Amino acid sequence: MFIDFVALQLVDLVAALVLLAVYVLFFVEHDSRRIAPGFLLSGFIATVTGLYMIFTWPLPGSFNIAFGELIVLFGSIFFFAGLALQRDWDLLSIAIVSVLAGVAAIIVGIRILDLKLTQAPGIAGLGYLFTGVAGILVLPVYFWKKSMLLRIITTVVILVAAVLWAITGYASYWAHLDEFGKWLPATMHAAPPAGS
């Protein structure tokens, strides 16, 4: 049995997406520093766990790419967005990176649907697709932040992505508590009898 922490990554992504929705709807024009600590926190968790995943490959096959690499991209974007908001830096370069990460998420979402990866490929594939579209919409919101219609549409897309990942993430916690209930670390396994 392999051990994974994808549930943590997904619930962290849900938190980050909800913060992004709040930012886009309420803080994009003013008071943006108030959202910075949440971006920093969720970005840090995603980046650290994602880096561990891409360097160690704890999951079977291509799941390490789909979940590890993309969570590093999104985690880094959220972390540096939080830093930029805190220090009052311009967000244009982060919005451009968000577009490129969004395109990657759309490609992964389509491929998950195509290959029927994960236990619920429909939800995971749509989660990636909506997250990707949200990443792409960040750039138009940057340029047209006064357009409430654009901000509402973007917020809806972000929240749909958050709901899809919440379904997967919280369901994973529910299942993992049962599946890993009898798991023991290597140090607790019975030693082989002497002379074997």
Image (cartoon, rainbow, N blue to C red):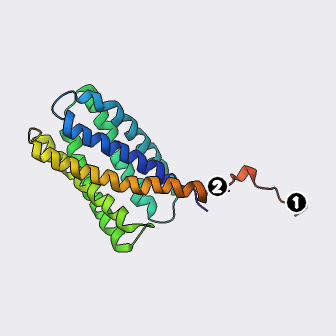
Give the residue at x 30% y 67%. 110
Q: Which residue is mark 1?
A: 193
Would residue 182 appear left or right of 135 to someone viewing this image? right
Q: Residue furthest bottom?
A: 115
For marks 1 and 2 on the same chain, the one whose residue lies earlier in the sequence: 2
- Badge 1 amino acid: Pro
Label 1: which secondary element: loop
In the picture, the disc for residue 181 is 2
Please tell me which residue lies in front, 74 or 30: 30
Q: Position of residue 31 (x, y in %)?
A: 21, 27
Of circles 1 and 2, the one toward us is 2
- The quadrant of the picture occupied by the N terminus is bottom right
Query: Is disc 2 surrounded by few (<14), some (14 to 19) or many (20+) residues within 10 Å?
Result: few
Q: Nearer the viewer, residue 133 or 70?
A: 133
Q: Would residue 132 be seen by someone viewing this image from the given angle? A: yes
Residue 129 position in % (x across, y down): 28, 60
Mark identifier at residue 112: none
User: What amino acid is labelled 2 in the image?
Assistant: Gly
User: Vertical placement of 83 versus 171: above or below?
Assistant: above
Q: Position of residue 9 (x, y in %)?
A: 44, 49
Is 92 on the left or on the right of 122, as rendered? Answer: left
Asked whether, in this view, residue 156 is left or right of residue 105, the answer is left
Task: Give 136 or 148, whichever is nearer the viewer.
Answer: 148
| x 34%, y 49%: residue | 73
Residue 180 place in picture, x, y as percent: 61, 56
Q: Is residue 91 visible?
A: no
